[in-house]
Image: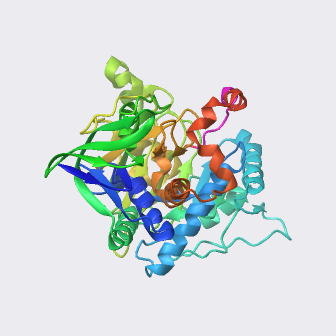
Amino acid sequence: MQSSADVVICGAGIAGISTACYLSVNHGITDIILVDERPPLSLTSDKSTEAYRNWWPGPGKAMVALMNRSIDLLEEIARQSQNRINLNRRGYLYVTGNPAQIPVFRRAAEEAAALGAGPVRVHTGRAGEPAYAPAPRHGFDNSLTGADVFLEPALIRRYFPFVTEKAVAAIHARRCGWFSGYDLGRWMLEQARARGVRLMEGRVEGVTMAGNRIQGVMVDAVSGAQVIETGAFVNAAGPFTRLAGRMMGLDLPVFSELHLKVAIKDHLGIIPRHAPLTVWTDPQYLPWAAEEREFLAEDPETRRLLAEFPGAVHFRPEGEGKSRTVLMLWPYHTRPVPETFPLPEDADYPEVVLRGMTTLVPGLRAYLDRLPKPYVDGGYYTKTKENRPLIGPLPVEGAYIIGALSGFGLMAAAGAGDLLAGHIAGTSTPDYAAAFLPSRYQDPAYQQLLATWDDTGQL
């Protein structure tokens, strides 16, 4: 069977859908086919924490600029849809119990401000300091930008009483929060389909080329195998980005890490429902009783639970009304792994995360004797070495990529889709576009920068 399209997009996750949306809405390119063997948004896009932030490190302003643009678009969608996506601006609260981290926190806030995240307000309890404004429980007040830096433990406890008394400093980054990723994706897909974008259920099996130019896409579709004639192919394959690249003879510089999250019912109401997304930044050893440590040490399989775990265990409340659900995450699976589905299991993950979380929120110790029934899901962070996305044209003429969106796919999707749509349509692109081009790796200066890259911005 033969068909044709101006653009074929491999992958109906949030990245592919966003690209189709902005191509059709902003550029009038509507002869687009989205190809996916699964229902839209069902592989990893609906497994996200659904949080967003413009709080990113350098080098350069590119990540902050991309996220600011993406958040602008999220707010625009929220207004257009009567906030169907449930966008809030509760913020991210970063907390440390290590006094040596206090100057690090100050420098991080100053760097973020210099990169465009917004002004810094320092709170030590002294007279004359700017007042702290708690985030509203609902809505996305766009006056909340920059960060509030707390350097007085009593102030941390005043505004965030659920946090451990061991906290010595905290940063409340303000242009941050969360939203419904599924509703965002459905809204974008509706906009695209209303303008003629087609959704095809099937697997992309290969790409045909004439010389070094895209000529067609081979699809094993439910309706039968077919070749779609096209001059533009978009690799939006998420965790299968590298596989889709190989169909064009490209070895893309990406790898994947397994990332899980656990949801529990906080039936004791320990976590306030209006809390921000809260992160304990310090590495830690899990709190085990002496007899538990002795038992775990006997078995090589469990001995790993006695090792030091990295920082960044974090949580956020989930749901509205009478919901008591709390999402908890700890990104300690950092070894590159092959992408397999269903996901590999980690039977220890719920207890490990809850135990680690008690360091940040001591009240959660009430659950250690009887762990609430957990629900675990997750996906893969497909990423580049420096944890920056690939957005733009590939070395094959007519081929494009929107990938390596790692753990920030939902928050970046609107900005990334808008950016790639500009590349495909041939319009001017913003200054930060160059930072995400796949061709950046051919630049000797960029390779030199990679060798000294310090902070990838991953939680």
Q: What residue range appears in magenta?
A: 450-457
Can residue 451 be found in the magenta stretch? yes
Can residue 68 be found in the magenta stretch? no
Q: Position of residue 449 (x, y in %)?
A: 70, 31
In this rendering, the count of numbered labels is 0
Q: For this view, does 216 lie left or right of residue 222? A: right
326 or 173, which is in the foreground?
Answer: 173
Can residue 201 be seen?
Answer: yes
Q: Specify the color scheme.
A: rainbow
- Image vertical order of residue 176 relative to residue 244, above or below: below
Task: Give the residue at x 48% y 46%.
Answer: 405
318 or 56, which is in the foreground?
Answer: 56
Magenta stretch: dominant secondary structure: loop
Query: Image quadrant for the C terminus?
Result: top right
Q: Position of residue 29 (x, y in %)?
A: 43, 64
Q: Specify the quadrant of the image occupied by residue 283.
A: top right
123 or 329, which is in the foreground?
Answer: 329
Q: Position of residue 97 (x, y in %)?
A: 64, 45
Can residue 56 be seen?
Answer: no
- Image vertical order of residue 203 relative to residue 29, above or below: above
Q: For this view, does 374 lie left or right of residue 419? A: left
Of all residues, the one furthest to the left in this rendering is 223
Q: Specify the quadrant of the image occupied by residue 14.
A: bottom left
Of all residues, the one furthest to the right in this rendering is 128
- Image vertical order of residue 304 relative to residue 245, above or below: above
Q: Position of residue 397 (x, y in %)?
A: 49, 40
Task: Give the residue at x 47% y 26%.
Answer: 307
202 or 137, which is in the foreground?
Answer: 202
- Image vertical order of residue 80 relative to residue 308, above or below: below
